[in-house]
Image (spheres, rainbow, N blue to C red):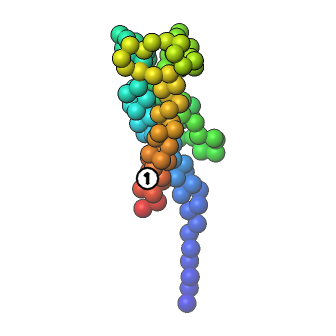
Amino acid sequence: MKFGMKWRGREIEERVTRAAAKGMLDAAEHLLEHANRTVPHDEGTLERSGSVYPDTPLGVIGQEMRVAVFYDTPYAARLHESEPGEYNFRGRGQRKWLERAIQERQEAIRDYVAEQVRSALR
């Protein structure tokens, strides 16, 4: 009886890494959407400045994967880090909106990555 086996570890590693990176990007988009529900809103400039940036290209293997979610206005950090009562957000919005969104959506963020990896292994 003859037995043969072909090792495809590198291929699987690459497939899983790309899937995890895609999941992180999907999770970041979800996080931005959730954060935009509580971002301070006056004219919408701050909300429109929200972006997702993949710090790691989807095809790169062997690096730490990172995705950035940020708001790009001169006052975004100041409003986010403001003290309670320092600003009146006039109706919609709250301080620490991005930090709160991360805390509220931790499980969903993990699920986005896990689902992409599971799908890649099928």
Q: Nearer the viewer, residue 27 or 15?
A: 27
Place residue 36 in its image quadrant. top left
Disc 1 crowd, CA 10 A, few/some/many (<14, 14-19, 20+): some
The kind of residue on which mark 1 rests is: Glu
Q: Nearer the viewer, residue 72 or 85?
A: 85
Disc 1 element: helix
Q: Vertically, is 6 above or below 60?
A: below
Q: Identify which residue is drawn at 53% across, 12% down.
A: 86
Q: Identify which residue is drawn at 42% across, 18% down.
A: 40
Q: Nearer the viewer, residue 32 or 59?
A: 32
Place residue 29 in its image quadrant. top left
Q: Return the residue at label 1.
A: 115
Tell me residue 97's x, y (percent).
Answer: 48, 26
Q: Identify which residue is drawn at 45% across, 50% down.
A: 111
Report whether residue 117 is seen: yes
Tell me residue 67's x, y (percent).
Answer: 54, 34
Tell me residue 25's x, y (percent).
Answer: 47, 37
Q: Vertically, is 18 above or below 8?
A: above
- What is the quadrant of the C terminus in the image? bottom left
